[in-house]
Amino acid sequence: MTTDTDLPPLNPVPPGLYRHYKGGWYEVLDTVRCSETLQGMALYRALYGGWGQWVRPAGMFVEVGEFEGRVQPRFVLHDPASVPLADLPTAQALVAHLQGLAQRRGVDLDTALRRPPPEPDTCCGRGCNGCVWEGYYTALAFWREDALALLSRSA
Ligand code: SF4
């Protein structure tokens, strides 16, 4: 029988918000062990599209390699407090990440705090002053600040 002391090191990937070199946002949930190879696997989920959960060898998750013609990390860890809010995929990923983090701590952010600001569904189409997106990102930054403060109290 295999005991824990016989196992190779897990080399855990820090949980958190990551961006793939191609631009997609993900969150690492945990590092688990493959029952067949015993190697550590990063368990992570996509913060877009089908929101699927994936595993990938932990060493491969954190590796630096030549991707798209330059040497760079496959994934980069980002601090949710300082991710620039200037595009919708990033805004959606941030909201999903903070809501997921809260849920895993038994907190429903929608009720413990408030719902995140709604995504704009109007656009003047004329490059106007007072862009609806500027208002959205400003409101989202306030929501993020409050969500992170609440999460720091529930850690
Ligand atoms: S400035 Fe904003 S609201 Fe106006 S057209 Fe551009 S995106 Fe739409």
Image (cartoon, rainbow, N blue to C red):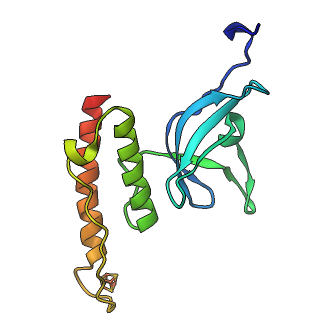
Residue farthest along the bottom direction in this orientation: 126
Out of 12 and 122, give the one closest to the viewer. Answer: 122
Q: Is residue 100 above or below residue 154?
A: below
Quarter assignment of residue 109:
top left
Could you say where residue 57 lies in the image, as x and y percent from the top left? 71, 37
Do we see residue 80 in this rendering?
no
Do we see residue 137 in this rendering?
yes
Is 92 displayed left or right of 13 in the figure?
Answer: left
Q: Is residue 15 above or below residue 10?
A: below
Quarter assignment of residue 20:
bottom right
Residue plotted at (27% across, 87% down): 128
Q: Is residue 19 above or below residue 150?
A: below
Out of 122 and 90, give the one closest to the viewer. Answer: 122
Is 10 displayed left or right of 50 in the figure?
Answer: right
Residue plotted at (60% across, 28% down): 12
Residue farthest along the right direction in this orientation: 37
**Which quarter of the image is occupied by the C terminus?**
top left
Could you say where residue 154 lies in the image, as x and y percent from the top left? 28, 30
Could you say where residue 9 lies in the image, as x and y percent from the top left? 69, 20
Q: Quadrant of ligand 1?
A: bottom left
**Which quarter of the image is occupied by the N terminus?**
top right
Is 54 displayed left or right of 92 in the figure?
Answer: right
Q: How many marks?
A: 0
Is 146 displayed left or right of 41 in the figure?
Answer: left
Could you say where residue 43 lies in the image, as x and y percent from the top left? 59, 38
